[in-house]
Image: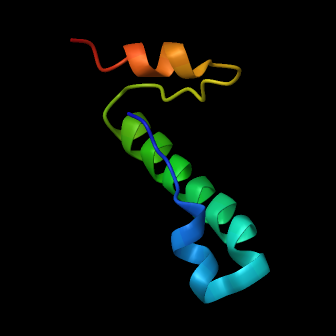
Amino acid sequence: MGLSSIYWRESWKYGERAFRYCQHDAGHAIAAVAISAAALGYEARLMEHVTDTEIAALPGD
């Protein structure tokens, strides 16, 4: 599962606070995924230090 945020869509409403709100919303989404995965017996992991090329290859052909 991949999560992303679009900063400029928040910035028109929240101005300088938009970046912080995007990070906050992403944190809530990550927690929801982790809790849902645990409830189903899976483990959710945060992938750090992944390149754009590696991310583009994840969905497959």
Quadrant holding the N terminus: top left
Residue pushed farthest right? 16
Q: Position of residue 52 (x, y in %)?
A: 56, 22
The residue drawn where x is 46% and y is 46% is: 35
Residue pushed farthest left? 61
Residue 60, by quadrant, is top left
Question: Image check: 15 left or right of 34?
Answer: right
Question: Image check: 12 left or right of 17?
Answer: left
Q: Where is residue 16 in the image (x, y as percent from the top left)?
A: 78, 78
Q: Position of residue 47 (x, y in %)?
A: 60, 24
The residue drawn where x is 60% and y is 29% is: 46
Please say which color scheme the image uses.
Answer: rainbow
The residue drawn where x is 74% and y is 67% is: 20
* Viewer-side residue, 4 vs 12: 12
Residue 58, by quadrant, is top left
Question: Image check: 25 left or right of 43?
Answer: right
Number of marks in the rendered image: 0
The residue drawn where x is 43% and y is 36% is: 2
Quadrant holding the C terminus: top left
Relative to 32, residue 24 above or below? below
Residue pushed farthest bottom? 13
* Viewer-side residue, 4 vs 43: 4
Relative to 18, residue 54 above or below? above
* Viewer-side residue, 49 vs 24: 49
Relative to 5, residue 35 above or below? above
